[in-house]
Amino acid sequence: MLAIAVSVVYHLLIDFRPQRKNDVSHYQRAIEIQQRLEAVLELVAAEQYSTPQIACEIDVSTATVSRCIDALRKQGHSIESVKIDGQWCYRLHGSSQKGSSKLAKAGKS
């Protein structure tokens, strides 16, 4: 009985703890990540962007772009690196679609 009471108090403290001004809910964070992945996928589909260029377009680090590319590959997207006009770029294997404009939603502040 004491264990149940302790558990209830613990969860009440966690659930109702004061939020810091900069706290972002886990749900909001997941949405931002998904929007970033969509923006990266859109740029990859354009077949003209390298890692640094993608990073610049969506205002993130090159390491974040690499993590996004890895995550997209794990989601089943066939992304490959190709050299086009002397520049390394990403492209979707077997795709020639051009992206539209989800960049504004990608977490640019």
Image (cartoon, rainbow, N blue to C red):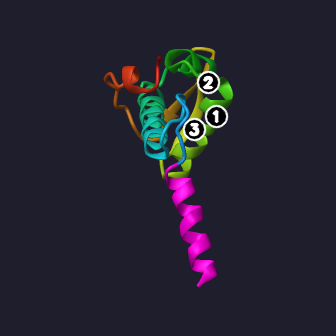
Front position in the image: 9 or 41: 9
Q: Residue type at mark 1? A: Ser
Marks 2/3: CA–CA distance = 9 Å
Residue at the spot of label 1? 66
Q: Residue type at mark 2? A: Thr
Q: Are marks 1 and 2 in contact (CB under 8 Å)?
A: yes
Q: Position of residue 88 (x, y in %)?
A: 62, 22
Location of residue 22 by image quarter: top right
Q: Mark number for residue 69?
A: 3
Q: Mark number for residue 74?
A: none
Q: Mark number for residue 51?
A: 2
Majority secondary structure of the magenta segment?
helix
Q: Position of residue 5 (x, y in %)?
A: 57, 74
Question: Residue at the location (64% across, 34% down)?
Answer: 66
Answer left or right for 102 relative to 33.
left
Dot placed on the residue nearer the N-terminal end, 1 or 2: 2
Q: Are marks 3 and 1 in contact (CB under 8 Å)?
A: yes
| Residue that lies at the very extreme toward the left in this rendered image | 100
Dot placed on the residue nearer the N-terminal end, 2 or 3: 2
Q: Residues within 10 Å of mark 2 (few under 14, many from 20)?
A: many
Marks 1/2: CA–CA distance = 7 Å
Query: Does any portion of residue 84 appear in the rendered image?
Result: no
Q: Which residues are magenta?
A: 1-16
Q: Is residue 64 above or below residue 10?
A: above
Q: Position of residue 34 (x, y in %)?
A: 44, 40
